[in-house]
Image (spheres, rainbow, N blue to C red):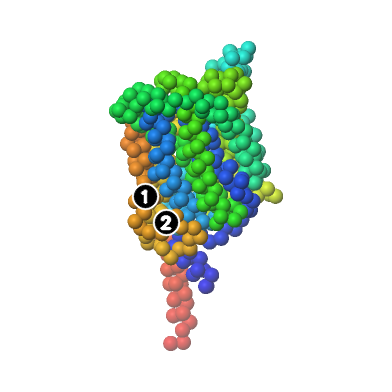
Amino acid sequence: MTVEIENEHSKLVGESGPQSNHPPRTIGFISFLSIGYFLVSGGPFGIEGSVSAGSYAYVLLTYIILPIFWCIPHGLITAELSLMVNKDGGCSVWGEKAFGEYVSLSLGLFSWFAAIVDLSLYPVLFVQYFSNCFNGTPYENDLWGGGMETCTHCRLLIAFAVIVLIVLMNCWGAEQVGIFSTILSVILLTPFIIMVAMGIGHVQLGEILRIDGGLSNFKGVQWGVLLTNLVWSTSGFDATGQLAGEVKNPRRNYPIGIIGVMIITITSYVLPLLVGMQYDRDYANWQDGQFSIIALKVGGQWLGILLSIGGMVSSVGLFQCNLCTSARNLYSLSDRGYLPKVFSKLLPRRETPFVAILTNAAIVCILILMPFQAIMSLDMSIYSIVVTIEVIIYIKLFIWNPDYNRPYKAITTRWLLPYMASPMVFTILILVLSPFSIQWKTLVAVAINLAIVATRYFHNRYKQKNQMKSNNILDYEEESLIKKYSIN
């Protein structure tokens, strides 16, 4: 009886109790740092499109200043809440602790959907950078070389092969994902280090800041494109919370690891952008894959090929780390009873959520057929909703639940809450500035999410009602028997 009361109390306060079976703690600090880097950044690949938004001065300032109000608060919120719950599941577990099961389910589904859409970008990027490797070679126009982007079945075959290999790596284990991510991060950053070392001495900062009117051309900047690219290229701190139950010594590794990811990410963006802007003064030329072209100008064909290889490596790392964390989200929702139990099944001996991994990979195989820009815009709209709810969760727990155990505290005073809430400014801007075609798709996704949550709510009410009827019948039959055989 005592155990039943305690379990019921845990459900009421939003705690699901210990997981019956879960992956082991195998991720050390270096592996966590590498996984975190791929979840948040994965290198400067993909940020080239933000330069085409307008004045170089505003692009640089955006990447230097705005992360202070986006990355730092979001990263610190992730560190505090991850250590508070100390189990796999990330934002859905935070939502359960703050508002109960329905918010947990809704947020978990939103986060999972955003991650799945995000995952579908990386096989596309891999093929693009693979194709760029053949620029300036005899195979530049070959269907299986530089002309691969014109061959649909070639692109899809390579993309599906990448998906299969990464699925196998994830099924092997999170520890192996971390080790492989460390190797990949070194490979992808090496060509950028070389490019910056060779080109930084030629940078004429004053001239760069005056291009296209400099700071006087505020109205000429496409702020929607710039903000979407910035947030997309620096998002993902909360995804590290999906692995909270598998990180060794989390009290030390989470705060230090997240701060390390912030420093590496911003540095690896700003310095290559500076060099790139020096060698390509026309912002209209900038598009995805532009760094490979700039590397050709800085160091020649060998550096261009090396950078394209780095782009392929980045895509692999991004895919494998995001697949790892999105599978933990699905696993956690299933393990806590919000989804069918099949998604929480672990692979024998390896102890990895293989059903969740395979399910996510199968969905990605369908989504890779969508255009890149459409995928990214929808991804950021859904992710903006997730971040907004995460900030609300943090504020609620900070104000109304100060007694919860917090091994790490991001802030100690309410006066800093407005700063911690600053990511919401970005999320609202992204939702408002998104084109109508993305806004209505986002509304459809929200409607589907709410329909699923409402279905669970009414299903629970139906079960409770039937349970009450059953209890009333049993009570009536028991009372009748007592009256029938009563001496009086």
Residue 390: image location, x then y, percent: 42, 49
Which residue is painted at 59% across and 58% down in the image? 20
Question: How many numbered discs?
Answer: 2
Badge 1 crowding class, 10 Å Cα cut-off, few under 14, some 14 to 19, many 20 or more, is some
Q: Amino acid at mark 2?
A: Ile
Which residue is painted at 38% across and 29% down in the image? 57
- Secondary structure of the residue carrying tag 1 is helix
Whether residue 62 is visible, yes or no, is yes
Q: Nearer the viewer, residue 3 or 392?
A: 392
Task: Identify the mark nearer the N-term, 2 or 1.
Answer: 2
Q: Nearer the viewer, residue 228 or 374?
A: 228
Residue 234: image location, x then y, percent: 46, 39
- Secondary structure of the residue carrying tag 2 is loop
What residue sits right under mark 2 in the picture?
411
Report the disc number at residue 299. none
Which residue is painted at 57% across and 58% down in the image? 19
Q: Nearer the viewer, residue 334 or 117?
A: 117
Report the disc number at residue 419. 1
Residue 185: image location, x then y, percent: 60, 37
Horizontal relation, residue 151 to residue 61: left or right: right
Which residue is painted at 50% across and 68% down in the image? 6
Badge 2 crowding class, 10 Å Cα cut-off, few under 14, some 14 to 19, many 20 or more, is some
Horizontal relation, residue 229 to residue 220: left or right: right
Quick check: 75 above or below 193?
Answer: below
- Asked where in the image residue 252 lies, by quadrant, the reply is bottom right
Q: CA distance from mark 2 to mark 1?
A: 10 Å
Residue 377: image location, x then y, percent: 41, 32
Q: Amino acid at mark 1?
A: Tyr
- Asked where in the image residue 394 lies, by quadrant, the reply is bottom left
Quick check: 139 above or below 318?
Answer: above
Whether residue 22 is visible, yes or no, is no
